[in-house]
Image (cartoon, rainbow, N blue to C red):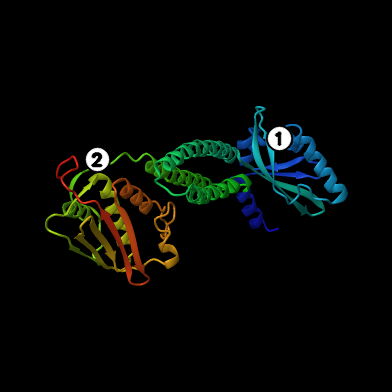
Amino acid sequence: MHNQDQAVLLAILEAAVDAIIVIDSRGAIQTANPATTQLFGFEKSEMLGKNVNMLMPSPFREQHDGYLANYLKTGEAKIIGIGREVIGKRKDGSTFPMHLAVSRMAVGDQILFAGIVRDITDIKNAQRQLALANEKLEHRVQERTAELRAAQADLLKSERMATLGQVSGGIAHEIRNPLNAVRTSVYYLRNVQTPSPEKVHEHLERIDRQVTMIDNVITALSDIARMPEPAVIACDVKEMLRKIVSSVSMPANIQIETDLPDSGFQAAIDPNQVSIVFRNLIRNARDAMPDGGTLSIAGQIAPDELVVQVSDTGIGIKPDDLARVVEPLFSTKARGMGLGLAISVAILKKNQGRLEVESHLGKGTTFSVHLKPFSGEEPGHDE
């Protein structure tokens, strides 16, 4: 080997971040780089000629001697060329987890072995934190599940939802997906030997996001269960719609048209609750027109009811989905939770109203809100 090549190899050895130890066939340390002295606390002179098992506590030192002897006798590689997790021992007697990769080298007629050692204390700590976070997550899910069961009982008593089977199936779907993502991250952090700090952070962040998603689903369902009795007053529906439209952000490529009666358009409702319904419908209409279109809000007075129609010229809803759009946890949106229309139906039922939907693929969708007109007999006052 040329002197220049030797100088380059020596420079690499000296500058390496990982500890590099070279031993002979008897296990005696031939050389070690500065990272080794920094990691183990021994000076280079204290290690040269000593058996490498001085850097390992029992039973790892005995196992290592056995592996080396077995390889030289049979050629069977139990550690050579295979990275493995072991325990290292510093000069002060303290121990730490490390990843050890051993390679065989032939230098002239001599057989040497090079071991590359990396301290994986931080990774093991991250794995322990992840296991703890997973335990907390499971406990949190159990707590939330208990709350959800109580909420479902309230829903059944108040007849806000028709069947618990639909709700349970939807909840299982909404919770199982983020749990699968959590499981994937746990598997990665437990099985990848030396993940980078960036990868560890990325997977811990993903777990936090998925836990938040689960919490949001259960909280939203619980909100439906705890919906208070409506505070019914005489509400000017036209004025209420005007305020809602002005509060919803709308892209420039969507035109808004309104056709509402100028007078007599009062409903006996809780405006705070019913505002949620119209806000959901207007947002849904907007989202159904990603390429722009027309959002129409029309109203009419019938003998026994007021009707408000919220229409869009968007993509429409498939016939198979049309009957299901008001079910809890059913959504046609890629990132939707599927609770907006279910909440709207529950609110209207509490306010003695109802919701109807009509849609044509490629032409648009119309939601019709039927409200009880104000007759002057209900307690309250104009909004």
Q: Quadrant of residue 308?
A: bottom left
Residue at (80%, 43%) from the top-left corner?
67
The N terminus, quarter of image: bottom right
Q: Is residue 329 left or right of residue 232?
A: right
Query: The C terminus is located in which quarter?
Result: top left
Q: Nearer the viewer, residue 138 or 237?
A: 237
Image coordinates of residue 284 in percent, x first then y, are 32, 59
Q: Nearer the viewer, mark 1 or mark 2?
A: 2
Q: Which residue is painted at 88% across and 47% down in the image?
A: 73
**Residue assigned mark 1:** 55
User: What is the three-letter code of the residue carrying label 1?
Assistant: Leu
Q: Position of residue 249 (x, y in %)?
A: 25, 56
Direction from residue 286 to residue 143 in the image, left or right: right
Instruction: Report if residue 49 is visible in the image.
Output: no
Write the residue at 29% across / 60% down.
Answer: 368
Residue 55 at least partly seen: yes
Mark 2 is on which residue type?
Answer: Ala
Residue 322 is situated, as x and y percent measured from the top left of the image, at 40, 63
x, y percent for residue 328: 43, 51
Q: Which of the pair 285/82 is nearer the observer?
A: 285
Vertical position of residue 90 compared to residue 30: above or below: above
Viewer-proximal residue among 197 and 189: 189
Q: Residues within 10 Å of mark 1 (few under 14, many from 20)?
A: some
Q: What residue lies at 39% left-to-right and 66% top-to-bottom?
A: 317
Which residue does the numbered mark 2 point to in the structure image? 231
Q: Which mark is residue 235?
A: none
- Give the SS element for disc 1: helix
Which one is earlier in the sequence, the residue at label 1 or at label 2? 1
